[in-house]
Image (tube, rainbow, N blue to C red):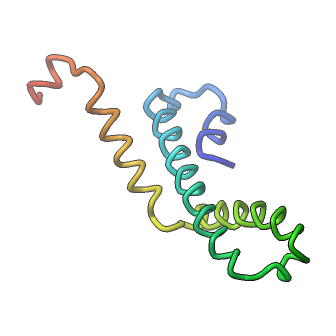
Amino acid sequence: MSDLTSLLAQGPQPALTKAAIEQARSTETAKNFEAVFLTQFVDEMMKTAGETAFGGKDQAEMWRSFMSEAVAKHLVEQGGLGLAGSVEQMMDAYTSAAKPQTPVERSGT
C-alpha cells in the first residue's frame, strides 16, 4: 500500500494535514519515477537472459515486460537505488521555492 493510500485510508484526523498529504504524494511520485527507471534497466538486463528463459520468442516479448515491472516495483519497495530519495528532495525544493512566502517567513522570524 502506498504512503498516500495509507494516509487517506485513516480518514479525517487532525494529524492529517495538507503538508502530510503533499509529502506522501511527493514520496509516491518519487518512488513511481524510480520504478519506471528501474523497469527499463531490468528489462535490458532480462533481454540478455535469452528467449528460452521465458518459454520462447513470443512469450519472452510478452512476459519480460511484466516481469521487469514487477521486479522493479519490488526493488523500489526494498529501497531501490536511492534515486527516489534524491528525486523527492528535488521535488520538495522546487515546490517550496515556488510557494510565495509571507512577510514573516521572509524575515526569518
Comparing 62 with 25, the one in front is 62
Q: Residue at x 77, y 82 (%)?
A: 50
Comparing 68 with 26, the one in front is 68
39 displayed left or right of 14:
right
Q: Residue at x 69, y 67 (%)?
A: 71
Q: Position of residue 102 (x, y in %)?
A: 20, 18
Q: Residue at x 63, y 76 (%)?
A: 45
Q: Hey, which residue is sitting farthest front in the picture?
A: 57
Q: Quadrant of residue 105?
A: top left
Comparing 75 with 64, the one in front is 64
Q: Position of residue 74 (x, y in %)?
A: 67, 65
Q: Position of residue 4 (x, y in %)?
A: 60, 39
106 displayed left or right of 67:
left
Q: Quadrant of the C terminus?
A: top left
Q: Residue at x 66, y 39 (%)?
A: 5
- Count of numbered labels shown in the rendering: 0
66 displayed left or right of 45:
right
Comparing 10 with 79, the one in front is 79
- The answer to whether 34 is drawn above or below residue 18 in the figure is below
Q: Quadrant of residue 83?
A: bottom left
- The answer to whether 90 is drawn above or below residue 76 in the figure is above
Q: Position of residue 29 (x, y in %)?
A: 53, 44
